[in-house]
Amino acid sequence: MCADIFGKKEGRWCVVVCPALNTVTQGRNVPDARYMITEATLLVIDSCRERGTLPRVLHKCASDKRRRRTVPRKSDWDGDDAYARGWKRIGKIRLPVRLP
């Protein structure tokens, strides 16, 4: 499975999000943040496997992907919300699972 990741600069940090599995982390720069989001997402997958919830989580990911909703469009946010501005797609990460 490949998942899109989005990032934005907040002060001295680069914040990244993987909406497919709802993981968020940060790094000092984009390469560091990409590494951190990959690690965080792999930990979510491992945790779901241990609890037996991975099939349900992946099913939800597949249905969300069909809706083609990742980071909401700017028009979906209130115009005064500063947090909504600045998200950019910074790539994809490969994950060792398949969507149903």
Image: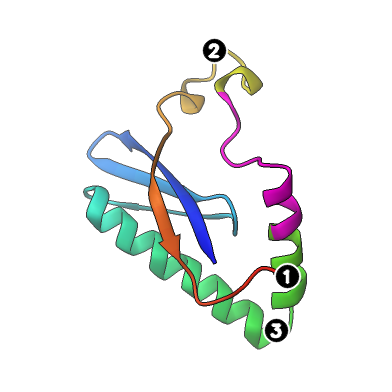
Task: Decide: is 35 above or below 63.
Answer: below
- Boundaries of the magenta span: 62-73
Q: Which residue occupies 42% across, 61% down?
A: 93
Provide the residue designation for mark 2.
80
Label of residue 51 in the image? 3
The residues tagged by marks 2 and 3 sit, at their Cα atoms, a distance apart of 40 Å
Q: Which residue occupies 48% across, 73% down?
A: 42
Label of residue 100 in the image? 1
Pick whichever, 2 or 50, lies toward us: 2
Q: Residues within 10 Å of mark 2 (few under 14, many from 20)?
A: few
Sequence-first disc among 2 and 1: 2
Image check: 17 left or right of 30?
right
Residue 49 percent location from the top left of the image:
64, 83
Q: Residues within 10 Å of mark 3 (few under 14, many from 20)?
A: few
Pick whichever, 71 or 67, lies toward us: 67
Are circles 3 and 1 on residues that touch, CB within 8 Å? Answer: no
Q: Which residue occupies 69% across, 59% down?
A: 61
Report which quarter residue 78 is drawn in: top right
Image check: 33 left or right of 76?
left
Q: Is residue 12 magenta?
A: no
Residue 74 percent location from the top left of the image:
56, 21
Taking the view exactly as shown, the residue that stands out farthest to the top is 79
Sequence-first disc among 2 and 3: 3
- Judged by depth in the image, the label closer to the viewer, 3 or 1, is 1
Q: The residue under label 2 is which amino acid type? A: Asp
Are circles 2 and 1 on residues that touch, CB within 8 Å? Answer: no
Q: The residue under label 3 is which amino acid type? A: Arg
- Judged by depth in the image, the label closer to the viewer, 2 or 1, is 1
Task: Decide: is 27 above or below 95.
Answer: above
